[in-house]
Image (cartoon, rainbow, N blue to C red):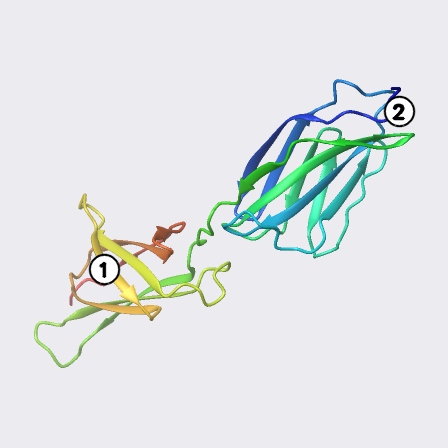
Amino acid sequence: MFFFFPGPPRDVIAQPLNETAVKLTWDEPLDRNGPVLGYFVDFDELNEEDEFVWQKSNRQFSTLVTNFCSDITGMEVEFSTKEAILVNLNADTKYSARICAYNSKGDGVSSKAKTFRTPPLKPLPPKNFKIDVSQSENSEPIRLTLTASWDEPENMKNLAKTYILRYKLKEDENYEEIVVHNTTRLEIDGARAGRTYDFRIVALYNGQEGDEGANSITTPVAA
């Protein structure tokens, strides 16, 4: 039998770049049957039983001359000759992808399915992390209070409910740690006058600490 079409691409590798982007690479088919003009990437979301979630595969298309991308479900892809970057994926989600080469005669044989999972969502640093100092005028000696405040991380969208606030005197080695629930503000009484305090803040999501925000403050010297 005479075959006109390319064989299956080989050695498909999926490399997560972040929570919503994965890089696919592959080797060209052993049997090309003429010049390979480009590749298709068909990919689907899988549930935990490895069943397809979508009714129709998402097909992304590339030639060696011009790059195209499909917006079937808002997905995007960036191509080079033998790699594709899938973006706008869902975090902590399983996918299946197949690669297909094509030549002037048509589509070739698809590669074996490559299953991969995107990493879980990791919170970015909390935004607008500030430390303020206030003092009580009706106590002797004067009491200093440090107030830490922050906003939810950019990528959480009302998902972050727990934070870990760490603080210490600048010269100390170890941080004190406070777990904060359902608020983005915390007061710490009893700060020392004329001292510098270092603060760290992270959001907690699905048991995973996010990226850290940092700030510091020097309290006023007592009169």
Left or right: 204 as drawn, with respect to 192: right
Residue 164 image offset from top left, x and y in percent: 29, 57
Residue 114 image offset from top left, x and y in percent: 60, 35
Q: How many marks?
A: 2
Q: Is residue 36 above or below residue 67?
A: above
The amino acid type, in three-letter code, at marker 2 is Phe
Q: Quadrant of residue 147?
A: bottom left
Residue 175 image offset from top left, x and y in percent: 21, 50
Q: Secondary structure at mark 1?
A: strand
Residue tagged 2:
4
Residue tagged 1:
178
Q: Residue at x 46, y 49 (%)?
A: 120
What is the distance, in whole Å, between disc 1 and disc 2 at their CAs?
Answer: 67 Å
The amino acid type, in three-letter code, at marker 1 is Ile
Q: Residue at x 33, y 70 (%)?
A: 182
Q: Residue at x 77, y 46 (%)?
A: 69
Q: Is residue 114 above or below residue 75?
A: above
* Residue situated furthest left in the rendering: 140
Say which of 156 and 116 sits in front: 116
Q: Is residue 123 above or below residue 160?
A: above
Q: Residues within 10 Å of mark 2 (few under 14, many from 20)?
A: some
Q: Quadrant of residue 26?
A: top right
